[in-house]
């Protein structure tokens, strides 16, 4: 392989070279100085996360990368561990200044360390995007669903694929139950209806046993009877 730089090397070949595990000394530094590369943060990402990149170069690049390449680095197990940790630190700082639209885009690819931060945002759009995260599992989601549960979170949950997952439905009902008695409660009994319906009859009785709010417990038990129509 000829270790030159564009325009001497075609761009497709150069992009493959950026991922090579053992480039010659000084090549990554020279690549980072390319004018065309400096305008393309998604490509600078490959230098910043390279395991052979000098530490000073790595930190300098990470300090100027926007959130999209930082999120890509944080999610890439092949990236240098220092690059991943710094990327996450930078994202945590940037999160506070993101617009709702940016947060909605970011939520779909947020690193696991930031899931609790994303979950706290009272925006159904952000939460709905997060619920589509490809790495989010049922166990992790159940751990996040805690009282008090805002209406926007319930709106996102009921519109997501998780509505049909029994452990999630049980946890949402439990969180709604505890939220109904919370001083900051903004929910009504009707918010629990889709989650009762999502459970089979026998599971509704199990769910009712965990509930403490009298009206919600009564409704859940009533809907566990075969002759009772939840739509009535």
Image (cartoon, helix red, strand yellow):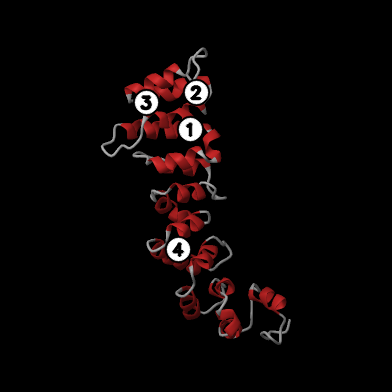
Name the residue that disc number 2 marks. 203
Name the residue that disc number 3 marks. 211
Name the residue that disc number 4 marks. 88
Name the residue that disc number 1 marks. 169
Nearest the eye: 112 or 36: 36
Q: In the shown orientation, is residue 39 left or right of residue 118?
A: right
Q: Position of residue 28 (x, y in %)?
A: 59, 81
Asked if residue 212 is positioned above or below residue 154 in the image, the reply reads: above
Q: Position of residue 216 (x, y in %)?
A: 37, 24
Q: Are marks 3 and 1 in contact (CB under 8 Å)?
A: no
Q: Residue at x 56, y 39 (%)?
A: 161
Mark 3–mark 1 distance (CA, rounded to whole Å): 13 Å
Q: Are marks 2 and 1 in contact (CB under 8 Å)?
A: yes
Res. 111 in view: no
Label 1: which secondary element? helix
Mark 2–mark 3 distance (CA, rounded to whole Å): 13 Å
Q: Label 3: few (<14), some or many (≥20) within 10 Å? A: some
Label 3: which secondary element? loop
Q: Residue at x 53, y 44 (%)?
A: 137
Q: Label 2: few (<14), some or many (≥20) within 10 Å? A: some
Q: Quadrant of the N terminus?
A: bottom right
Q: Residue at x 52, y 31 (%)?
A: 166
């Amino acid at each position: 392989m000829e270790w030159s730089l564009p325009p001497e090397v075609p761009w497709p070949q150069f992009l493959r070279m950026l991922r090579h595990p053992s480039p010659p000394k000084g090549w990554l530094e020279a690549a980072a100085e390319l004018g065309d590369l400096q305008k393309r943060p998604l490509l600078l990402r490959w230098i910043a996360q390279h395991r052979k990149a000098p530490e000073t170069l790595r930190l300098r690049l990470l300090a100027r990368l926007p959130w999209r390449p930082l999120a890509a680095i944080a999610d890439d197990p092949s990236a240098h561990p220092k690059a991943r940790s710094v990327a996450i630190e930078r994202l945590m700082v940037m999160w506070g200044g993101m617009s709702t639209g940016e947060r909605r885009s970011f939520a779909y690819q947020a690193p696991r360390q930031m899931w609790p931060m994303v979950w706290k945002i009272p925006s159904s759009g952000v939460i709905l995007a997060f619920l589509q995260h490809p790495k989010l599992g049922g166990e992790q989601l159940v751990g996040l669903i805690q009282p008090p549960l805002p209406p926007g979170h319930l709106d996102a949950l009921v519109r997501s694929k998780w509505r049909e997952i029994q452990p999630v439905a049980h946890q949402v009902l439990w969180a709604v139950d505890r939220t109904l008695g919370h001083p900051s409660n903004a929910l009504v009994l009707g918010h629990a209806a889709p989650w009762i319906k999502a459970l089979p009859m026998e599971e509704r009785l199990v769910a009712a046993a965990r509930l403490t709010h009298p009206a919600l417990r009564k409704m859940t038990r009533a809907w566990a009877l075969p002759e009772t129509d939840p739509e009535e």
